[in-house]
Amino acid sequence: TASSPPAYCQGDVIGDLTATGSGGTLTWYGNALLTNQLGTGSPFSSGTTSNASYWVTETLNGCEGPATKVDITLNGLPDATIQPPYGPYCENDTLQDLSAASAGGTWSGTGITDTAQGIFDPSTGTGTYSITYSVTDAKGCSNADTVNVTVKDLPDATITAAGPWCSGAPSTALSATTTGGTWTGAGITNGNTGSFSPGAAGAGTHTITYTV
C-alpha cells in the first residue's frame, strides 16, 4: 500500500516516497502504463522538483499486482511583494499606509505602528528602516518580502535675522540657511530672491515666511 504525501510548498525539500507490501518487490513507475520503470524498494527518491505522479506495484511469487498511484503536489508561494511607493518620506509626513500584493499578512520593522494594516510613521526619525511583510496562504505556504524605507531630514528653513528698517529704506535681500525656497509676506517683492521693500511693507511689524 502507498499514499500520497501532504502537499509541499515551493522551496520545500521533497521527501522520499514510501510503500509497504507483503514481502515482495516494490517497483516504481513514471506512467500509468507501467512502461517507465524508475526504481525499486521503499523508500524511493523521486528526485522531482515539481508536481508529479508515480505508480508502485508489488511483485510476489512472480506475479505483479495492481498499481497504486502516488501524487506529489507542489503549491506555489503567495506573492508577498511590497508595492511601491514606499518612500522616501520626510519626518513631517503623515502616517503612510503600505501595501503588498497579497492581503492578510503581517508587517514588521521600526516605524510600523499597525502590523495588520502596514501603517508606517515617518516621525520615527530620519534614517533607513528595514520593513518586512510576511504572509501565509490558505494552503499553508508562506512567503516574505523586505524593503528599505528611507525618512529624510527636513531642510533648515531658518531665516537669517534682519531689520529693523525705516519705511523709506531701500529694498534688501533676505536670506535663509537653506537656499532655493520661496518667500511670502508683506513687503516681499520677489518671492524667489527674498527681496523685501520696507516702503512696500509700510510701518509696523510684519510676518515673513520662508518655505523650502
Image (tube, grey):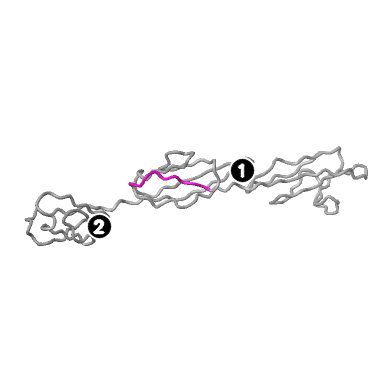
Query: How far across and down, in percent of the image, does residue 138 sit?
Result: 62, 40
Is residue 94 on the magenta stretch? yes
Residue that label 1 marks: 141
Q: Which amino acid type corresponds to the residue marked 1 in the rendered image?
A: Cys
Verify whether residue 87 appears in magenta. Answer: no
Amino acid, disc 2: Thr
Seen at 78% across and 43% down, the residue is: 42
Residue 210: mark: none
Would you identify the image quadrant in which residue 175 lies? bottom left
The crowd level at tag 1 (other Cα within 10 Å; few <14, some 14-19, many 20+) is some
> Residue 186 in the image: x percent, y percent?
17, 54
Q: CA distance from mark 1 to mark 2?
A: 53 Å
Q: Secondary structure at mark 1?
A: loop
Q: Which residues are drawn in magenta?
A: 92-100
Residue under the point 90% across and 45% down: 64
Q: Quadrant of the C terminus?
A: bottom left
Query: Which corner quadrant holds the N terminus?
Result: top right
x and y, in percent, of residue 7 in the image: 69, 42
> Residue at (19%, 53%) from the top-left corner?
185
Give neighbour class at mark 2: few <14, some 14-19, many 20+ (Cα, 10 Å).
some
The residue wearing badge 2 is 182
